[in-house]
Amino acid sequence: MKLLRTTILTISLLAFLSVPALAQTKIGTVDLRKLFDGYWKTKQVQTALNDRKAQLDNDDKSMRDDLKKGGDEYQKLLAQVNDQALAADQRDKRKQAAADKLKQLQDSKTAIDQFERQAQITLSEQSQRMRDNILTDIKAAVTAKAKAAGYALVIDAAAETANATTAVVYSSGENDLTDAVLKQLNAGAPISTTPAPVVTSPSSLLGTNMPRINLR
């Protein structure tokens, strides 16, 4: 997405630079990362993602605790299979019980692996969906401000190229809409409370690669 965004930015700038009436073209700028990080809904998204991850972590830990307990029981059964103090028929029963327990453990391990894969997908999809919703809000707010002020184009002054260099080499900042847009976005924010500690930063949510959730 970063490459696509940079490509679109480059094409747009070239198109405007090719227009003879560039002097009459009003261009504004925003710092998209600042808007994203400063938007109150971003913090709300972080909290929701952290809560969901904590719930999945707890479920995963519970299943792994049960797996460990079952493994301990399996080891005891194996020890009894080789216990010469037991009658042969009793050892045979322990042997069958150990085989059944091993099959159960294998099934549990498969279920845990599947749960962890699905949990990763769930968190990634939720993160992407929430991120897209936030960007939609930001774009709408920027569009409204730009139209009201008569800007023909608004570019992200904080954008980077595929080579991790700044896409916009210089901007005077005179036509920057960031603070005005951020004020509008946060106008409807609920009364702030002390935020819970977060694992995922706003900036990483804005990036193209969603952070991998470690459920182990």
Image: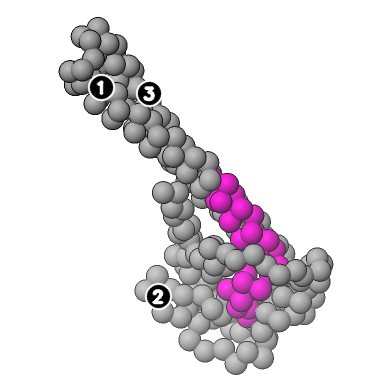
Q: Are marks 3 and 1 in contact (CB under 8 Å)?
A: no
Lower sequence index among marks 2 and 3: 3
Q: Residue furthest front?
A: 85
Q: Residues within 10 Å of mark 3 (few under 14, many from 20)?
A: some
Q: Is 143 placed left or right of 103 in the picture?
A: right
Task: Look at mark 3 in the image and give the residue it sits on.
Answer: 104
Residue sitting nearer the eye, 59 or 187? 59
Task: Look at mark 1 in the image and give the residue it sits on.
Answer: 80
Which amino acid lies under the numbered mark 3 shown in the image of this protein?
A: Gln
Task: Look at mark 2 in the image and give the residue it sits on.
Answer: 164
Q: Judging from the image, what secondary structure is the residue with disc 1 in?
A: helix
Q: Judging from the image, what secondary structure is the residue with disc 3 in?
A: helix
**For the point 68% across and 61% down, which residue is it?**
44
Whole-percent x, y for residue 114 in the image: 43, 35
Magenta segment, which residues? 29-56
Whole-percent x, y for residue 59 in the image: 53, 41
Q: Residues within 10 Å of mark 2 (few under 14, many from 20)?
A: few
Which amino acid lies under the numbered mark 2 shown in the image of this protein?
A: Ala
Distance between the alpha carbons at the discs numbered 3 and 1: 18 Å
